[in-house]
Image (spheres, rainbow, N blue to C red):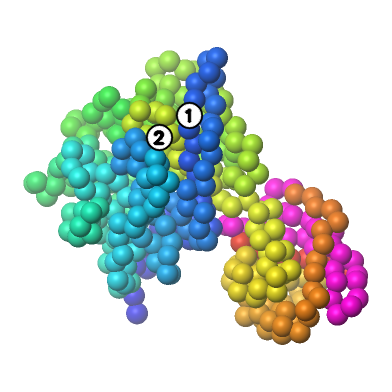
Amino acid sequence: MRSSIFALFLSTLSIFTYAQSNTEVHLFDIQKKDGKIHLTNHINVSNNEGYDNQPSFWDDTTLLYAATRNGQTDILKYDIDTKTSTWITDTPNGSEYSPTRILQQQKISAIRLDDNGRQFLYSYHPKKGTSTPIDQQLVIGYHTWVTPNQLVSFVLGDSSSLVVSDLKKQQHDTIAQNIGRSLHKIPNTELVSYIDKSKEQWKIRSLNPKTKETQQLIATLPEVEDMCWTPDGTILMAKGQMILSYIPKKDQNWSSYAFILDKNIQNITRMAVNPSGTKLALVAEVSPEGIVQQQLEAYNNRDIDAFLKTYSKDVKVYNFPNTLNYQGKKTMKAAYEGFFKNTPDLHCKIIKRIVQGNKVIDEEMVTANGATFGATAIYEVVNGKIAKVTFIR
């Protein structure tokens, strides 16, 4: 039985992991030409099944992020110049999240969630692989460094709290309640930005960790709580595939920064910019069309494991218009496993595909056991998995 702390983690931090949705970390070059921003040289850095998220830059050419492997989440280091990845953590019976370089040190900090429910902030030595608890008083979900000994954190509780910590004195001061997960040191200042979610319209506010004073900067984009700063003091936020910008004390409102045309990049969330402002890392869900296409390829290859990976655990399969045929991956496996083994000529060809939001509608021509027949399937994708299928036969 997991502890009450773990139960609190699950109930309060569902946003922390996006329910372990299927996300990818993408990297772009930021180029300025004719007064406009161009995002070029796109690379899918993670290209991995499962939860890949929370990017931050160690330096200009090194990216850190949390990635899924072997049923847990560990910290990966990606070298931009060599395009190589190295695992920093491999904690038995535990996972790490939110890797962040500790100021003026050759170490990173990350949230460790152990299988027994303990959740604390640790420091890690990237080369040695050793770890040390930083604080074991607070259940921290997200954090940013002000100095090597001063921390601003999103702390779990009945309401998520903004807490300023002096680690030398072991002093923790609660500044605000009901905040968002996005915490950042504001470039070229001693201030930190955070998201105030205490009212219906969310706000980006600045915090002076010394005086504890806060000041409103601007309202967020509707229902968006992820942001980052560029080195010149510009705020970036994203909605869907659109990235917008705002410069405090200069702009009156949000302006268009860039639009991602790649159909495989949907619902951009966390972002990070390197220290020189030449690289942008962002997290996005795998596109609905991409997931459905993976499902199709697995179907044609009669690969039951790859086929089932594209579906949510509680997937519902309907006959049009709303007759539930069956529910759950276990039932789906029972229905398809023998079919795949016993149908060597199985093949599905897409005649026409329509993509509308999270729905993909495929007009199909299926060959099986020497017969060919037509069908239409409506797929609904939620958090990077197919959650509902409706067949029109």
Marks 2 and 1 sit apart, C-alpha to C-alpha, by 9 Å
Q: Which mark is residue 273?
A: 2
Residue 365 on the magenta span: yes
Q: Is residue 274 above or below residue 12?
A: above
The image quadrant of residue 389 is bottom right
Q: Is residue 170 visible?
A: yes
Q: Is residue 199 above or below residue 160?
A: above
Q: Is residue 56 visible?
A: no
Of 380 and 366, which appears nearest the observer?
366
Of 151 and 279, which appears nearest the observer?
279
Q: Which mark is residue 30?
A: 1
Verify CB contact (< 8 Å) between mark 2 and mark 1.
yes
Q: Which mark is residue 260?
A: none
Please name the residue shown 54% across and 58% down the image.
22
Q: What's the amino acid at mark 1?
A: Ile
Q: Where residue 338 appears, x then y in whole percent?
A: 72, 85
Q: Which residues are magenta?
A: 356-384
Please name the residue shown 49% across and 36% down the image.
28
Horizontal side of residue 131 vs 53, given as left or right: left
